[in-house]
Image (cartoon, coloured by chain):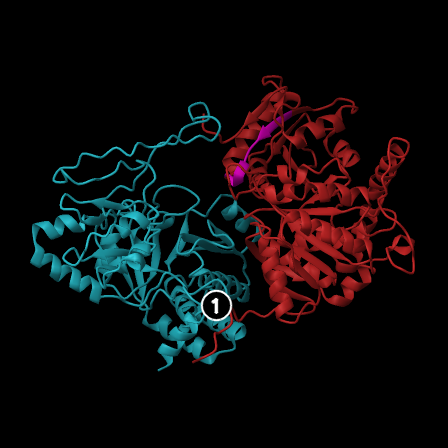
Chain colours: A red, B cyan
């Protein structure tokens, strides 16, 4: 009897190389390059693809870490929280309602200032049990002290995960950071990615050092005592200050990343054909693909439309968005999420942006669109329709105090 | 300035690595020719559903902008080549992501090529394939469906052979030299390179005219809008009331969900030997999709609008060879076997014997630890 053959003949190349990999595999490579010490996992799609790639790397002998499959997401997040307290670099992740099952652990992680990087394979919340992308899962922790960043391509996923470790573990910050990857459109899409070599990563990413906050017998400390109203506000204010500092640390990290890896990018937002734009569209994640194609088409017809892709949602790039959008006549925000009962029944990003642009002089009209829920297609035609509606709003022919659902069956 | 797009339709899990190898091979080979590309899945997932049709795509372009343009939709709808990794998929694609059946050639561009692994005759396959209304080409690679599992891969060169055939039918996407170079790099196996080249040389295309093929219009239904759909995710139960079917008086054909039907999810279907049936009811009781109709004479007839091909009936039937799972591609229609048997018992026996004997290798995947090792051992002897 022949022994069973192994799955594939693909080789994971160690060192700087070009690889055809998905967003999930890119995150796994980032874990390997960051030499993460402890990874906890609990399967839920589409996040589980990261588990598969990480375990493949471990079994191939390319990556050495504690890989713990927990019995639920709650334990998954608790274990890494504790591992982080004793000085381990940790990685965790989930999707949709799996992410929600860990909610208590996620709240305390941020409250205790435990740095970690999580991958969210963005997925619609149950019910119905849909697998496609929506951003409400990751967005739910937006006010708890988690830093949140959305990426568009496998390359950006890898780069951003490395940046996320550097920012989260910076002593000035010590906050968890979630890297959001759109389910299917990014987690299952492969592109050629430059996988950096270990030496470059090591020069960019220092070791995780908790200093005198390390939970260790040689450093006797207590973490997380019971505390009441005479303490709580100060604790919250410290987290607030850390999140405020994150802006500068993120900027530093992107500058250094650009120097070391040769891939320069604006830290908080991506501006696409925004020079002289009269109409701007705003969105996050892989939605950028049809939007960019549509913007190019409209530009070819002489329409002055641009696009701003929001990378970091927490800390929210208030200044950058004020700068990018203060000269346009109207803004269309395309949310791949919903905010039932919120102001104007708008998406989360739209309302956040309305607040950010409130103090701006000659404030542009802001129109909210909900599209692509549960992974539904957003194509270039949809985007062109949206841009047309935004142009109408600019000229006052369209109500900007409402929210428009695109691609829903009436 | 051009974009080339390949759609690979495969059986979830069983052929996931096969589809992945093909799509990655295309992107790597195109890269050798100075193009850029991407490979991605649709309706595929991890883990996938055993045997449920899923897709992967490989899209290659000269420029980044062109590539983006082709990708700015849910799935590329203008493919140069569609590869069906299992010939039963010529009956159409039934995904878990939506209800209904998509003709296998629906996303193929006019004049494109449908590439199928099959031992069947081209005409038999054309009869399965829905009429396209536009001319296209058919090319066959003489290979088995090559089913394996999530963690094991049956490296029988089907991937290399399909890549070789692809270079023949769509040289503008990838050339055979680039394909061979990539196979050599990826697998370090000269025999695999030879397989690709041999298939490249042997592959021929057959033109299919606009009006050739299965005339049947795939089942469709109108989905309700948000104003008409019942709130609270409620689905009303269907009464178990008996359907009135002519010739079935005294039997029991349950009312079935009129919109949720089964199509190419099935890779095999049960063939029933009514003469040996002892009417024990086990198939009827255990079928997870209640697909068995009770005939007027108390026998059990599998209804092909409801059968997902799981094989539980074959497993639970206490009589040897009363229920036999047979490859789906052996059947031209979904007609009742019992009606055929009642009309002409001798004729049915001939038909049944032929179907059961024609059992090319296929499985529902892996049932037990060590099965794959057993299968590969069989092949090496």
Residue where numbered disc 1 is placed: B152
In the displayed structure image, the side of residue B13 where residue A313 appears, left or right? right
Residue B371: name its quadrant: bottom left
Magenta residues span: A367-376
| Image spot of residue A82 (x, y percent) | 77, 53
In the displayed structure image, the side of residue B322 where residue B246 appears, left or right? left
In the displayed structure image, the side of residue A12 where residue B148 appears, left or right? left
Q: How many marks?
A: 1
Residue A179 inside the magenta-drawn segment: no
* Crowd class of label 1 (few under 14; some 14 to 19; many from 20; radius 10 Å): some
| Image spot of residue A216 (x, y percent) | 87, 58
Q: Is residue B75 above or below residue A263?
A: above
Q: Is residue B339 above or below residue B267?
A: above
Q: Residue at x 20, y 40 (%)?
A: B252
Chain letter of mark 1 equals B
Q: Is residue B4 visible?
A: no
Q: Is residue B7 above or below residue A379?
A: below
Is label 1 in a helix, a strand or a loop? loop
Q: Residue at x 12, y 40 (%)?
A: B247
Q: Residue at x 66, y 61 (%)?
A: A194
């Amino acid at each position: 009897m022949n022994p069973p053959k192994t799955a594939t003949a693909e080789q994971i190349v160690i060192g700087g190389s070009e690889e055809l990999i998905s967003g999930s595999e890119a995150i796994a490579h980032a874990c390997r390059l960051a030499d993460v010490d402890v990874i906890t996992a609990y399967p839920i799609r589409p996040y589980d693809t990261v588990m598969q790639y990480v375990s493949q790397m471990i079994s191939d002998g390319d990556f050495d870490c504690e890989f713990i499959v927990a019995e639920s997401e709650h334990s998954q997040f608790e274990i890494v929280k504790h591992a982080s307290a004793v000085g381990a670099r940790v990685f965790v992740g989930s999707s949709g309602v799996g992410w929600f099952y860990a909610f208590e652990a996620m709240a305390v992680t941020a409250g205790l200032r435990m740095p970690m990087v999580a991958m969210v394979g963005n997925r619609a919340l149950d019910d119905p049990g849909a697998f496609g992308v929506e951003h409400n899962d990751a967005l739910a922790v937006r006010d708890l002290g988690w830093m949140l960043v959305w990426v568009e391509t496998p390359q950006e996923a890898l780069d951003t995960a490395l940046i996320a470790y550097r920012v989260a573990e910076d002593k000035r910050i010590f906050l968890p950071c979630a890297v959001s990857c759109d389910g299917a459109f990014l987690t299952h899409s492969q592109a050629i990615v430059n996988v950096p070599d270990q030496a470059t990563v090591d020069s960019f990413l220092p070791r995780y050092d908790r200093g005198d906050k390390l939970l260790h017998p040689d450093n006797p400390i207590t973490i997380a005592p019971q505390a009441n109203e005479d303490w709580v506000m100060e604790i919250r204010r410290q987290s607030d200050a850390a999140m405020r500092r994150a802006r500068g640390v993120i900027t530093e990290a992107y500058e250094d990343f650009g120097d070391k890896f040769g891939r320069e990018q604006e830290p908080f937002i991506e501006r696409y054909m925004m020079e002289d734009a009269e109409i701007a569209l705003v969105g996050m994640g892989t939605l950028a693909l049809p939007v960019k194609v549509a913007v190019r088409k409209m530009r070819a017809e002489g329409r002055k439309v641009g696009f701003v892709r929001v990378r970091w949602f927490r800390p929210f790039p208030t200044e950058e968005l004020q700068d990018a959008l203060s000269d346009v006549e109207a803004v269309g925000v395309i949310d791949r999420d919903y905010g039932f009962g919120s102001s104007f029944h708008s998406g989360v990003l739209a309302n956040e942006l309305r607040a950010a642009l409130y103090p701006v002089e000659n404030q542009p009209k802001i129109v909210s669109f909900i599209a692509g829920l549960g992974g539904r297609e957003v194509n270039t035609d949809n985007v062109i329709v949206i841009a047309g509606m935004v142009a109408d709003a600019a000229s006052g022919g369209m109500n900007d105090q409402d929210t428009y659902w695109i691609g829903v069956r009436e | 300035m051009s974009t080339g797009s390949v759609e690979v339709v495969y059986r979830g899990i069983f052929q996931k690595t096969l589809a992945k190898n093909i799509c990655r091979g295309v992107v790597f080979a195109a890269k050798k020719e100075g193009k850029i590309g991407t490979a991605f899945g649709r309706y595929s997932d991890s883990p996938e559903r055993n045997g449920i049709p899923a897709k992967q795509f490989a899209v290659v372009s000269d420029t980044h902008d062109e590539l983006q343009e082709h990708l700015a939709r849910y799935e590329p709808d203008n493919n140069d080549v569609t590869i069906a990794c299992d010939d039963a998929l010529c009956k159409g694609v039934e995904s878990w992501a939506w209800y209904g059946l998509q003709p296998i050639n629906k996303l193929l561009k006019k004049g494109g090529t449908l590439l199928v692994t099959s031992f069947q005759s081209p005409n038999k396959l054309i009869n399965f394939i829905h009429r396209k209304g536009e001319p296209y080409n058919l090319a066959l690679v003489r290979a088995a469906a090559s089913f394996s599992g999530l963690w094991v891969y049956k490296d029988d060169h089907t991937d290399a052979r399909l890549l070789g055939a692809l270079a023949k039918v769509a040289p503008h996407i990838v050339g055979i030299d680039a394909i061979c170079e990539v196979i050599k790099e990826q697998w370090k196996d000269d025999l695999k390179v030879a397989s690709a080249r041999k298939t490249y040389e042997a592959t021929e295309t057959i033109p299919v005219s606009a009006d050739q093929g299965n005339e049947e219009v795939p089942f469709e239904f109108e989905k309700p809008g948000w104003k008409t759909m019942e709130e609270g995710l409620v689905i009303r139960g269907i009464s178990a009331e008996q359907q009135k079917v002519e010739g079935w008086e005294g039997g029991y054909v349950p009312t079935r969900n009129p919109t949720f039907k089964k199509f190419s999810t099935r890779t095999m279907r049960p063939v029933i030997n009514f003469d040996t049936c002892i009417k024990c009811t086990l198939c009827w009781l255990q079928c997870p999709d209640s697909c068995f109709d009770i005939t007027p004479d108390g026998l059990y007839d599998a209804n092909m609008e409801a059968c997902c091909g799981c094989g539980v009936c074959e497993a639970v039937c206490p009589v040897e060879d009363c229920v036999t799972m047979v490859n789906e591609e052996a059947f031209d229609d979904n007609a009742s076997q019992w009606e055929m048997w009642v009309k002409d018992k001798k004729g049915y026996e001939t038909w049944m014997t032929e179907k059961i004997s024609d059992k090319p290798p296929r499985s529902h995947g892996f049932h037990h630890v060590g099965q794959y090792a057993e299968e590969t051992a069989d092949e090496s002897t």
